[in-house]
Image (cartoon, grey):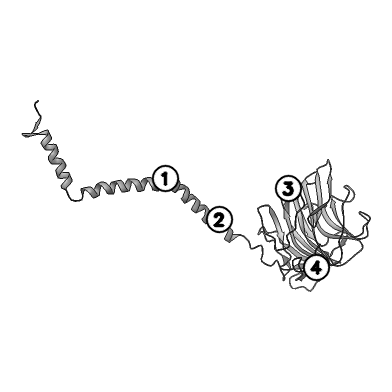
Amino acid sequence: MVKATILGKSADAVALKTRERVKNTPGRWWMKYQYLILVVYGLFAWSPLTVHAAAAEATLDQAATTVAEAPNSAAGDNGSLRFNGSNDVVRVAKPLPLGETFTLAGWVNRTVSNLDQEVIATLNDPADGRRLYAVVIDGHGDLCGSPEGQYVFLIGEGGENPPLCSHVVAELGRWHHVAITQVNPHDHRLLIDGRLTVSDSRSAVVHAGAATLSFGSAEGFGDAFGGLLHGMSLTARPLLIDFVPERQPLTVTPETIALWSFGDGAGRMVKDRTGHGYDGLVSVRKGRPSPGSDEPGPKWSSDTPSRTWDTLP
């Protein structure tokens, strides 16, 4: 067999010589392994696991920023606001969104008996001031009869809808958790101390839209509330089952529209803890006091449900 020659040398000899030159050339092995290391590192750096890890880290950073920027719902919660039972009121002028489902709830301590309809809170139509919903105390039984002084949920104006009577008396000096809830535009409930006391279903749609809110009194409707309010909230969810009311500072959730601790302790504003800007003005039924005025209005108190265990249900 005839072997091929290259410049007078056989092909086998040339190949052998070339392999020996490559093998004995300094740094050749490092170049090969360095290239391999770069390839492996590049594959890892752009792998789906690495991309997902980077995205997760960014998400955690964003979540940490969100938590840091969230309002401190516990600030100023250790207190309440005392209404005199005559003309005290807190007005939230900015209309609140009332969808088809909502709950207005908070702690109530009645300290003054007016023997009349004592208005704890009202939700009103921002266009004409017409009452949409209210929670009151039926002082001498005009709405529900016996027992006198029970918590009542009113829906709409006047007698267009029957009142929801709880049959739970608002005893003087005792904290109760009171909640009115619209499960949907047809179904409504009144819960006292976390327990369902009465529910109602009707064919007509009552309301779904916006409303202004006032605590402690309502111009042109009933008498003022005399007592303490603490930890009131408006949420975009219904209360469907019995529950244990929170006695400690409330927290803001994604469903919280507004939260008023009534524990600000100073000034003429009741701050909305959600940061949504639904702050209330401490005032009186007739007129609006100017800054620094001595005109009477609700007074700050250190009393809360969490401090007075002996008066809790």
Point out the frontmost of discs 3 and 1.
Answer: 1
Please state which amino acid type lies under the numbered disc 3.
Answer: Gly
Query: Label 2 belongs to which residue?
Result: 63
Inter-mark Cα distance, 3 to 2: 28 Å
Query: Label 4 belongs to which residue?
Result: 310
Query: Reading the chain from its start, which is encountered first: label 1 or label 4?
Result: 1
Query: Reading the chain from its start, which is encountered first: label 2 or label 1?
Result: 1
Query: Reading the chain from its start, which is encountered first: label 2 or label 4?
Result: 2
Q: Residues within 10 Å of mark 1 (few under 14, many from 20)?
A: few
Query: Reading the chain from its start, which is encountered first: label 3 or label 4?
Result: 3
Question: Could you say which disc has been placed on residue 99 in the image?
Answer: 3
Verify CB contact (< 8 Å) between mark 3 and mark 4. no
Give the vertical position of 13 relative to 100 (above or below). Answer: above
Image quarter where the C terminus lies is bottom right
Please state which amino acid type lies under the numbered disc 4.
Answer: Asp
Q: Residue furthest left?
A: 8
SS at mark 1 in the image: loop
